[in-house]
Amino acid sequence: MTTYFGYAGQVLEVDLTSKQINISPLDLDLARNYIGGRGFNSARLYELTGPATDPRGPENVVMFGIGPLNGTLTCMGSRFNVSGKSPHTGILGDANAGGHFGSDLKYAGFDQIIITGKADKPVYLLISDDHVEIKDASHLWGRDVTETNLAIKQELGDNSIQIATIGPAAENGVSFAGVYANMVRAAARTGMGTVMGSKNLKAVAVRGTKPVRLADPEALYRLDKQLNTAILEHPDFSSRAKLGTPRNTIPLNLGGFLVTKHFQTAFFENAEALSGELLAEKYNMKNKSCHSCPLHCSRFAVIKDGPFAGFKAEGPEYETIAGFGSRCMNDNIEVVLKCNDMANRFGMDTITTSEMISWMMELYERGDITREEADGLDLSWGNTDTIMELIRKIAYREGIGDVLADGVRKAAERLNRGADIAMHVKGLEIIQAEPRGMKGYALGFAVATRGGDHLRAEPFFELHGDPAFGIEKYGIGETALRLEHKGKGILVKDSGDWCAVSDALNVCKNTMVCMEIAEYDVVAELMKFATGLEFTADEVQKCGERIWNIEHAYNVRLGLDRSHDTLPARFQQEPLPEECRESAGSTVDLEPMLDEYYEQRGWDVKTGRPTRAKLEELGLGNVADDLGL
Amino acid sequence: MKITVDAAKCVGCRICELECSFRHERVFGRSQSRIRVTKLEDVGLDLPHLCRQCNNTPCVTACPTATLSVNSTTGAIVAGDNCSGCGACVSACPFGAANLHPQTGKVLICDLCDGSPACVAGCPTGALTLDSGDSLTAINLEAERKRGQLAEKAATRLLRDWGLSK
């Protein structure tokens, strides 16, 4: 009998068709190779699903993965990962969120949950330490995320139970529905909520009473306190603690790379109206925190008067503000707050939703769609009634909402127009960061293993804006300059490995990546003190590489290659307009960055496919066999 | 001595729960903690709960095995070794501040960590503060301060009488 430290030591498997529940011990080889969280999920996803899997069929999986530090004092180790084959993109799907769900999964005694099959009627999973039950959720089906969360707490008589739930959007088969913990902690992208909905799985509720035991408690505690101190003393602490991610609006605008008018420009005249500063001044009542984090960068907002008087909810984050704000040419922050709440309650990814709305507005502007085709809606830029109405229609697949509910790539196919301005990569819609103003992020969107995403690479380093940083770290000054192309292949590979390790540990990228709180050697120490497993710094980094390689192999096995690592034409061909300050005139020259990136990865530069040599180096020779390399 | 709670400052991070479980047992866990935070997420409330050192100590009164007593210096509840896990204190406490340990079955009540509470030290927002609350000393110090002020004024008059400026 192995004693586990850090890890809970158990994996829970539930098949909803047969109602079989199985608990098995955690394989420590998996831990040594993949660390946890996204690592565990991606490794198992490669085994359990593939080209033949229908993402909405019972044979797809939905997995919840956490890391060895979840539930401990390690300040950033509070997130959880949800994975499956994506019904939105058709490739690897995963999503990640903060809050408190991950900790209780650890206290209940599980490092991972793997759910297969389909229930014959709506159910929710109740996990109470080792006691696992499939409970009737017919009375919950149709209810929004907030209502469901409160209803489960009430029926179980437990205010502290942690719940990850879907909303009506998932139930209605919207392809970009998410999974929501603590009401607003959104594991939103790639349709993992849609997968749950396709299984008739309304929620996973978990409570646990087990402690997390540590291999070297004193050493972990000391290191945890040091990391907490580093956060509290960081120069960014003040603004991050007070404003959260909405602190981004004004600096991005001043640099001319705030997503505006569906990427037609990148400067928004009234950015102050969408700023973190305004939210702090008029709407934020207090801060809110994820488990065990001293940064407490979330906020609870209240609207006291006006058309939304009485509104109260946690959030929003920067993506949603720019998404329903500048991307749609709306400068009414209260509407943005309301839209965030609507999307959270319906359980829909705000980033994808913002692309659907702003894409429609651009189609309308250039005369490619009429009001009649859009159920009579006035699709003029900034029409706030239309923005709110479209969110509701999409969630319920009503009228034009039905066309939009499968994402922008499918909507363009279905309407037979607008594919040239459908802002996605591999079917996943692009975030509120203008690629022409951030070349490293642009490359990151093109190569991310879940589609057009920024969190796979998060090359925050290029925002330093001072070549001295680049010279010190990479010997290439341009890596620290967002408008430069040179060295971005190296940066994105390096940052990508670090992000994969972060997601395997389930730590927060705000602290781990953007505040540069730790490096690989610190992670090796955290692992040793928490779990007893010994890693060198290089071995930790190799885990990150291994995760990238297994995920890329998953997609390559589905038929992807270099031709899919691309960007919408606008970013490569249309220079940013004059008003975009320092970023004016900029385009993305993708191909040379891709060449450099594949070289760094040890992949074939022509095809973008992994090489046998690289896979074998990572112990993935069987994957090389699968791919016929 | 009491720990005071300011709910407006609590962000619900629950670091206090982890500091507590670690201080007492060298593990991390909510269920091993003597301080518990309730989160009402739809209204944004985060509220830590812990022993308030009631004057009438309903928990001590309810305990059938005389396991619980009061520390005369700090006022904290102290649990001895012979807890039977009956849960009478849990029922008696009006504040939900008494729990039973899920693995040992024995009582968990805040003991103020011998005067230097781990939760207070670890709280990142100052939502938990330690009030050494020796109220008699505080009142008498106030009187001493007034006497000092009067003495300052009397000294000025005395020096003037002696022909010296202060």
Image (tube, coloured by chain):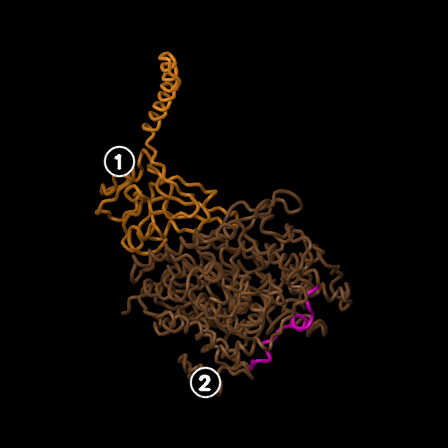
Chain colours: A brown, B orange
Q: Which residue carries the number 2 mark?
A: A612
Q: Secondary structure at mark 2?
A: helix
The answer for which chain carries disc 1 is B
Q: Secondary structure at mark 1?
A: loop
Residue found at the far bottom of this picture: A628
Count the numbered circles shown.
2
Quadrant in the picture for residue A102: bottom left
**Can residue A136 be seen here?**
no
Q: Amino acid at mark 1?
A: Thr
Q: Residue A360, position in %: x, y?
A: 70, 65
Depth check: give the residue in front, A285 or A259: A259
Q: Is residue A567 magenta?
A: yes
Depth check: give the residue in front, A552 or A476: A476
The answer for which chain carries disc 2 is A
Depth check: give the residue in front, B36 or A435: A435
Numbered badge on residue A8: none
Quadrant in the picture for residue A323: bottom right
* Front of the two marks 2 and 1: 2
Q: Residue A331, position in %: x, y?
A: 67, 53
The residue stretch that appears in magenta:
A559-577
Q: Amino acid at mark 2?
A: Arg
Q: Which residue carries the number 1 mark?
A: B73
